Amino acid sequence: MKWKTAISSYKDGEFYIRGVRLAKLVDDANLAETIFFILQGKQASKNQAKMLEAILISMVEHGIEVPSAFVARSVVSTGNSQNAAIAAGILAIGDMHGGAIEKAAFYFQSADSPQVIVERSIQRKERLPGYGHKVYKTEDHRTTALFKKSQELKLSMKYLNRAREIESELFRQTGKVLPLNVDGAVAAIISELGFNWRLGKAFFILGRLPGIIAHVEEECKNEKSYRRLDSEDVEYVGPTAI
Amino acid sequence: MKWKTAISSYKDGEFYIRGVRLAKLVDDANLAETIFFILQGKQASKNQAKMLEAILISMVEHGIEVPSAFVARSVVSTGNSQNAAIAAGILAIGDMHGGAIEKAAFYFQSADSPQVIVERSIQRKERLPGYGHKVYKTEDHRTTALFKKSQELKLSMKYLNRAREIESELFRQTGKVLPLNVDGAVAAIISELGFNWRLGKAFFILGRLPGIIAHVEEECKNEKSYRRLDSEDVEYVGPTAI
Amino acid sequence: MKWKTAISSYKDGEFYIRGVRLAKLVDDANLAETIFFILQGKQASKNQAKMLEAILISMVEHGIEVPSAFVARSVVSTGNSQNAAIAAGILAIGDMHGGAIEKAAFYFQSADSPQVIVERSIQRKERLPGYGHKVYKTEDHRTTALFKKSQELKLSMKYLNRAREIESELFRQTGKVLPLNVDGAVAAIISELGFNWRLGKAFFILGRLPGIIAHVEEECKNEKSYRRLDSEDVEYVGPTAI
Amino acid sequence: MKWKTAISSYKDGEFYIRGVRLAKLVDDANLAETIFFILQGKQASKNQAKMLEAILISMVEHGIEVPSAFVARSVVSTGNSQNAAIAAGILAIGDMHGGAIEKAAFYFQSADSPQVIVERSIQRKERLPGYGHKVYKTEDHRTTALFKKSQELKLSMKYLNRAREIESELFRQTGKVLPLNVDGAVAAIISELGFNWRLGKAFFILGRLPGIIAHVEEECKNEKSYRRLDSEDVEYVGPTAI
């Protein structure tokens, strides 16, 4: 089977990423620029790299309560290696946990007008991914902070403006304030930075990974026995034992 | 079941990492510092963060030939989501692919003398993880570059010196030049930065993830059909069909 | 968090599956009946169990060429545990590898007429899952054998007949002979046995698992080094190294 | 890369498992015989297949409380596909959950005497895998049932007797009654049936899979929102938020 790739190559004892010596990237030592470069094959500006860094950090941790944390911890607790536990944490990421970024980026990057996007979501009786939050009713302060940073870094605002237009259109059509949440903001920014919507979950994983690792390591260090649900948390609703 | 954690908390509409507002970390926008902080619970110096950044970048890509790349691509090629493919790529990391870091860090962080470490590996007829390379016979230039950077950044050299002492001891006891390779250098540096050896594979995954994602996305973008081995690559060695 | 289940319970030192003592199931020792019972909560007839057994066996192995085999082998080859390798093999199952069963069962179990089902697939320019085969042009002998067994076991034929009607309708509308293939036959049979289409991939995994395990064990037993692609199988198509 | 296999082959439109037509195995429709045959490459006797069937059923379900159940359910609850959820459930199997079979089979198949085996576990202050149970203090009735079935089926008793000798030796050296538990019984039986100890976890997975699938499907069918820990189950023990 033929495997084609444009990502890396090896020549005369040197390893290259998309034509650039890996040793040079190591020497420059900028992680966000490297991520941008290996994924897009072009150089980020210093400010684009700063913005990428900010959104990755914004996703790093969500508490022990979320599946990507407690699933990873449960898997390492039964005696598995850390890579198996990390893989399980990543499997726990899905449409309902980290998935809004991919979905929002998809329609941000579509050719549809804000009006059509909102109409369609109303017709389908679906909540529009990237808007609304159970705690932040009128404004998500994390979105505000990311937008502010984007302006400070003098980045283009095409997708960020589009995201705000959809927010206005949502209010117009539904009469409800559904503020752009942090997932929506991240979706707008990765679109602004030139990434395909398909990478939505991958970006969430990139940002989230240090948090997953922190949970796996905390479990290894501090916990002795393997994770079982308490019997008081379980309710049997099946046929009577005979 | 009780789940204890010191990693994150939520108070009055703000999310905190080990007592520090996540919003502050986003605002500072330094990924390597965030990784250091969420894993160790203390602030890295600017130079420690720079060093961490360098070693993560050094592990980012190893060619499409390695299991963490072609396994991830094969899984996405059958129609799975990117998170499942990334998880499979991480499962492909193991003692023989990325695992030398954990093993080398383990004995770097042990109380054993270089002499004892080398003697034991000779007795067990095991290659000492972190030393020797099939191409770089006398010196691994990636190791040299990481050591140089470490000196430039004026970091402590306790584990790096210990790694060199073991290299000398290896030559003394075996008569062979087995240079400290890049896995060994990374192991020495994460030890120097205060990380437990248990995190060896996790650091490899942290560094490697952008490369895995680049492969998964390249497969999604460019390849149509799902990955099957060619029949000429397969040799049937079982009983004759009857 | 409350976890409700009707699957199993524990009382007075005895474990029960849907109200029946596990010890009784062990004593009866019929694996297919147990699978049917734990999934549906009712007793299979002897003949239904026989049919289930036949379709599970029909899916057991597909050669080392398919992703569920070579991915699992690659993961164990890097030094991972067998459970991690088996998990990776299962991750390699997807819409394009084992996924046709779920899709065919979905429209077999829908309220749509054969005419509508075929028309829609033509409009969408999609191949109808469960029909056609690159080698078996006019008849898939595996389908024939499963149908014959179904008649011998005197099972109901509702979904099997429906599958044949769709085959006729396909010919009527396209003019091409696209025989019901083994995936389609399995989809019709699990529908006949009362299983929800959602379980399509799960049934494929149930049948496939012994084959995956055989490959993982063969790799552990016979192969020494970890799996890397040969450089002649790789083509670099990226920018020139600079 | 060359991939050698003795498991399956394809010739003249027919697929073969270790030289035997798959169609024949499907026609015979005996799942346990097929599992035995694909793993060992030889025919099980009817009674060996019956015994294999019994032990697989004995492992099918362990309650929603165990990681292989609640991890799989949590992964499907976030919107992942069933194959990803099943893979996560299998990742949750480990040395402390299903792993005793592999360990017990390892020393059952070793050349060491019962005396040496027990002495070594006492010296290492390790509990001997396969012995003792927190509820069944003097006898594990599941072990008793499996031994009884083994006698009824007139199977050889080499490893079963050895397992009992170790039980006696344990009492002799420790003064405590530590009955052979069901993991130990399964380990003895797979040894008796000729399987390598390395397959211990794989057998647990083979038996366990229908239970995992039942949990995944129950979650898909009955539960709406994704699994999060309740905040009352979480205790934050880190530095005060500043």
Image (cartoon, coloured by chain):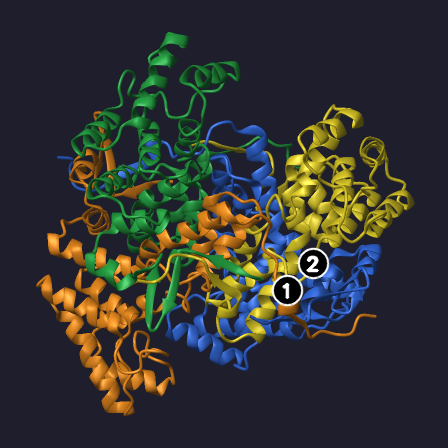
Chain colours: A blue, B yellow, C orange, D green
| Between D38 and B129, the one nearer to me in the picture | D38
Q: Disc 1, disc 2: CB below 8 Å?
A: yes
Q: Quadrant of residue B125?
A: top right
Give the residue displayed 56% in from the left and 33% down from the top: A220
User: How far, Cα to Cα, is label 1 from label 2?
Assistant: 9 Å
Q: Amino acid at mark 2?
A: Glu
| Between D52 and A202, the one nearer to me in the picture | D52
Q: Is residue A97 above or below residue C95?
A: above
> In the rendering, at what x and y percent does residue A138 appear?
54, 59
Report whether residue D207 is seen: yes
Give the residue displayed 57% in from the left and 29% down from the top: A222
Q: Chain of mark 2?
A: B
Give the residue number, with chain letter if any, for mark 2. Answer: B61
Q: Amino acid at mark 1?
A: Ala
Q: Nearer the viewer, mark 1 or mark 2?
A: 2
> In the rendering, at what x and y percent does residue A189 appear?
65, 66
Residue lying furthest left in this view?
C154
Q: Quadrant of residue C194?
A: bottom left
N-terminal-most mark, 1 or 2: 2
In the drawing, does residue D127 fall left or right of residue C19? right
Report whether residue C155 is seen: no
Give the residue number, with chain letter if any, for mark 1. Answer: B214
Which SS class for mark 2? loop
> In the rendering, at what x and y percent does residue A219 appear?
55, 34
Which SS class for mark 1? helix
Q: Is residue D6 above or below residue A113?
A: above
Q: Is residue A150 above or below residue A84?
A: below
| Between A122 and D80, the one nearer to me in the picture | D80
> In the rendering, at what x and y percent does residue B88 appear?
52, 55
